[in-house]
Amino acid sequence: MHPKFQHFIDGQSVSPQNGDWIDSINPATGAVWAQFARGNAADVAGAVRAANTACNRPDWRDDSANRSAVLHAIADHLDKNFEQLIEMEINDNGKRIREVRAQMAGLGGWYRHFAMALADMQVEKLSLDQPGVSAHLELMPFGVVGAITAWNSPLMIAAWKVAPALAAGNAVIIKPSEMASASSVVFAELLAPVVPNGLINVITGYGHEAGAAIVAADAVRKVTFTGSEIGGAKVAGTAAEHVKPVTLELGGKSPQIVFADANLENALNGVLSGIFLSNGQTCVAGSRLIIHNSIRDDFLRRLQSNLESLRYGDPLRDDTDIGPIANKPQFDKILAMLDRAKQAGADILAGGHKVTVEGFENGFFIAPTILQNVATDSEIWQEEVFGPVLCVNGFETTADAINMANDSHYGLAAGVWSSDAEFAKDVASRVHAGTVYINHYRSVSACAPVGGVKRSGYGRELGPNAIRDFMQEKAVWQGDAPMPDPYAQ
Ligand code: TXE
């Protein structure tokens, strides 16, 4: 029998009302390892009721000191117990243990950051342009927030949503991906001793069932989504019908622009970490390398030789460099895109195929792939692969490089590599993206906003406004002089 992961509602583990379950496949073995509750509208209704009650309790809604204390308690509890979450997530999405351990060890930090940021929030006095009145700004939580997450880093993505949403005084319903729900369920169960009932609920299931029901529920007043462009567009459509705001963190096709004067060792590490760590399954994957023609061949040779020594294997082992792709649909999607790229004439410098790994013959492994001379209007150059696939094109002039970088319907992140700091800053300001890294890549911090332009989505997570983004403004006016007779004027 496989372990069964239930919903988590109002502080309790709860079976799905229709008795249906979804199989979760371990991508390293290709075998079912667990089952998740297949949530429906009735399950969602229970979570919404619990969340709505929890967020309207005065000791939550009106007591920021209590909220800060709960967030600190979550952070401390995660610091002590995060080890329990590691294997859960790897069984679901196959990410390498070194990366997952680092993410889990850092989980408490996101909650601690927002506990402290909340303590620093001030009531704002508004300066009015009228005599006889004064006003101040009150910030109100939305109430219930729906947090829809993806399979690549379920608990880190959830932290970016849940921590500021709770700090703001909301209650949350997390809907993890149907491909990787185990860690979110165990996370909520683990925190039960330190989180008042109903503030963190988890409903598992499919997007079009459980996810859609959360977005449509009346009491859910804000939705925050990380996932695909198609999923995001559906969520935004449903949210629009029900008149509620949405934050969308969607895909990307992020460029890494390497200029001739760049420190090539640093650029090499940045490009490698941008696209091959996590098998390219990160929203900011630096999947388009735009490199000056004068350094291109040398750089690509070094990149190739770095890939040769990498070890495939069990994602649970510390000495594994390349684990499996997270799930079968993603594996099939990447291989199909590679086939079409080959047919379209892309030149394969490395990889380009699946890999059979001893002991994991049914696992979903793909070789790190470098494609060069890729037509800039081709699918593989323009569309998100979300896999270990780097596409390369050379440039001659800075204008060509920037035009190539911006010729995309996405705009999540970009890398700029140059030894000339002023020049690099100028390029960074001309690149269309929500995040630009200069001589660096892939870091995230609670202090810096994350989000996209164009079809990479809208709204931001993290950063200085993260808590306010989960609140609504209320202007409170105060008459300081007698109210005039309205008909006397
Ligand atoms: O995404 P989906 P998938 C990209 C990447 C990948 C592709 C597909 O290119 O190949 O998306 O991944 C829920 N109402 N990214 O299929 O379907 C769904 O259940 C409400 C980029 O996983 O968008 C899941 O919880 N919810 C990305 C979540 O949305 C709905 C990370 C994401 O699923 C829904 C992962 C609906 N109608 C994939 N439809 C990033 N930005 O980092 C789906 N969901």
Image: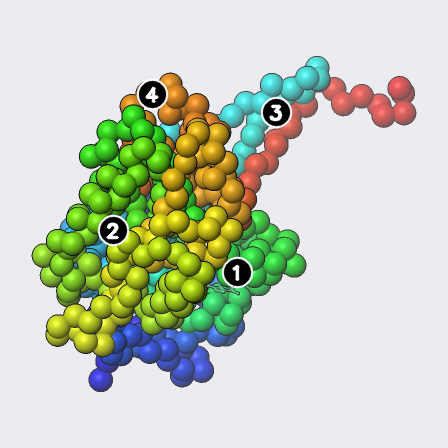
Q: Confirm or deny contact between disc 2 and disc 1 (CB under 8 A).
A: no
Q: Residues within 10 Å of mark 4 (few under 14, many from 20)?
A: few
Q: Calculate the distance from the C-alpha at mark 4 to the C-alpha at mark 2.
A: 27 Å
First reached walking from the N terminus: tag 4 or tag 2: 2
Q: Could you tell me the amino acid type at mark 4?
A: Ala
Comparing 442 with 198, the one in front is: 442
Task: Identify residue for label 2.
Answer: 277
The image shows residue 421 at horizontal and vertical percentages of: 33, 20
Q: Does the numbered disc 4 mark a residue whose Cβ is under 8 Å from ligand 1?
A: no
Residue lying at the far left in this picture: please name it: 319
Q: Residues within 10 Å of mark 2 (few under 14, many from 20)?
A: many
Instruction: In the rendered structure, find residue 135 and report the number of the disc placed on it.
Output: 3
Residue at (21%, 49%) from the top-left corner?
Answer: 304
Q: CA distance from mark 1 to mark 3?
A: 43 Å
Residue lying at 30% horizontally and 49% vertically, measured from the top left: 275
**Callout 1 secondary element:** helix
Q: How far is mark 3 from mark 4, CA to CA?
A: 45 Å
In terms of sequence position, does the residue under pointer 2 or pointer 1 come before the other?
Answer: 1
Q: Quadrant of residue 413?
A: top left
Which of the two residues, 165 or 453, is positioned nearer the viewer here? 453
